[in-house]
Amino acid sequence: MKLHGYFRSSASYRVRIALNLKGLRAEHLAHHLRKGEQCAPAYLAINPQGLVPALEEAGAVLTQSLAIIEWLDEIHPEPPLLPKDPLRRAKVRAFALALACDTHPVQNLKVLARLRELKLPEEQVTDWAGWANREGLAACEKLIAGEAGPFCFGAQPYIADLCLIPQLANARRFGVDVSAFPRLLQAEAAAKAMKAFADAAPDKQPDAE
Ligand SMILES: N[C@@H](CCC(=O)N[C@@H](CS)C(=O)NCC(=O)O)C(=O)O
């Protein structure tokens, strides 16, 4: 299995956590996003979106972190990354999608690059990214307010936690005061105590700067 990623990529970070939780090994192939390597023709042949991650396995190429994670969960069901009960599954997915579809893409590298091209001052670019993170995380804090901890949805991590931990890292990078989200920080503390999460952290990756 080959995982195309980048140490600071939060979508790659989600997949790294899933691989570690499942005890699976992958060869990590780094593409330096700030140098634009995701747009090199050789990589566009793998993922025409020019985004990481992409996972290569037995001649197949999978893209989109949540599609990759759900595929991993289907072929390696233990430990499960979604609860069994359909209603609980929908809630966990909704939390994950609130971050993966409605928060992360708005503050993604190429969106911020486009704002810079449109001459938005750097301070306002950072303000935009901070706002996107704050909005998304504030909603997520409410989504799990009534859920038992320590993880987002109870006693074990699900895809919600896989999306949350990288997003909190992004939020801090953009100067968001995450102390406003105590329930999310409780889930983060539980996750960070697990080796699978700790080993997936950006600063533990071979391409970390
Ligand atoms: N929805 C995609 C998002 C992938 C994505 O946006 N990856 C970012 C890094 S976290 C990327 O490759 N950005 C490159 C760019 O913006 O040019 C997924 O979940 O895999």
Image: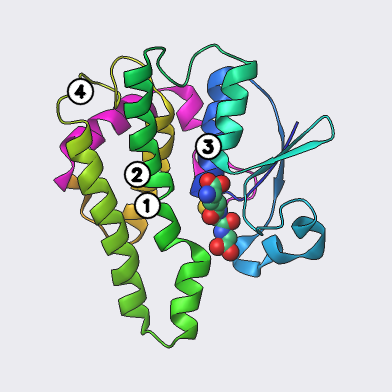
Q: Residue at x 36, y 58 (%)?
A: 173
Residue most toward the bottom? 119
Horizontal and vertical percent position of residue 149 = 23, 20
- Distance from disc 1 to disc 3, alpha carbons, whole Å, reads 14 Å
The tag on residue 157 is none
Along the horizontal axis of the image, is 57 left or right of 192? right
Q: Is residue 165 above or below residue 187?
A: below
**Considering only order in the chain, which callout, 2 or 3, is on the residue closer to the N terminus?**
3
Say which amino acid is labelled 2. Answer: Ala
Along the horizontal axis of the image, is 17 left or right of 147? right
**Considering only order in the chain, which callout, 4 or 1, is on the residue closer to the N terminus?**
1
Check if mark 1's residue and mark 2's residue have beta carbons within 8 Å: yes
The residue that mark 1 highlights is 102
Say which amino acid is labelled 3. Answer: Leu
Say which amino acid is labelled 4. Answer: Glu
The residue that mark 2 highlights is 98
- Distance from disc 1 to disc 2, alpha carbons, whole Å, reads 5 Å
